[in-house]
Amino acid sequence: MAMLEKLKCLGVQLSIDDFGTGYSFMSYLEQLPFDTIKIDMSFVRKIQENGEGSIIAATIAAMAHALNKKIVAEGVEIQVQLEFLTKYDCELIQGYYYSPPLPADELAIYVKRNHAAIQNTLPVNQYLSAHPGMSV
């Protein structure tokens, strides 16, 4: 715990990965000095057009915001998932909806081509507002 606190003092941001699976105990939410909760892709994949499968993702998002934590959603692949996560103020998105994993040289090209923020990561809503041509 002391090492995590030292990292935080250095400006390192910490995340709880794959929240809701394995050993992500609820007690960690108040004990550990983390900044972000990553919603596991197994919950994101369950988000359907009819709203089914979204209860756990919505609950994790509400809990994260109540604790003043940011949210990263893993495995976003379709528009309905992005729309749902945007509705629940998910700040960061990872997944094939935007791009498959890329080597560093291809990532630089992708970032330039898509006007993504290099210095700062923008929340989804802010990015979409700044880029009206992109739709959700």
Image (tube, grey):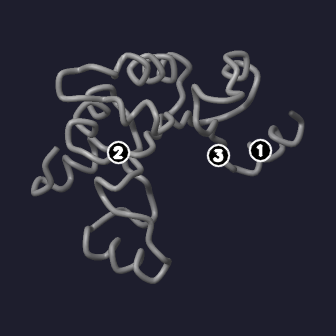
Tell me if mark 1 has few (under 14), some (14-19) or many (20+) residues whose alpha carbon lies within 10 angstroms of its own: few
Q: Give the amino acid type for the residue marked by disc 2 in the picture.
A: Val
Q: Badge 1 is on which residue?
A: 9
Tell me if mark 3 has few (under 14), some (14-19) or many (20+) residues whose alpha carbon lies within 10 angstroms of its own: few
x and y, in percent, of residue 10 in the image: 76, 51
Q: Badge 2 is on which residue?
A: 76
> Which residue is depicted at the point 41% across and 74% down?
107
> Which residue is depicted at the point 32% across and 25% down?
88
> Which residue is depicted at the point 45% across and 43% down?
74
Q: Nearer the viewer, residue 18 or 120?
A: 18
Relative to 23, is 77 above or below?
Answer: below
Q: Is residue 107 left or right of residue 19?
A: left
- Mark 2 touching mark 1, by CB under 8 A? no
Q: Nearer the viewer, residue 59 or 65?
A: 59
Q: Is residue 20 left or right of residue 94?
A: right
Q: Badge 3 is on which residue?
A: 13
Relative to 13, is 113 above or below?
Answer: below
Q: Earlier in the sequence, mark 3 or mark 2?
A: 3
Tell me if mark 2 has few (under 14), some (14-19) or many (20+) residues whose alpha carbon lies within 10 angstroms of its own: many
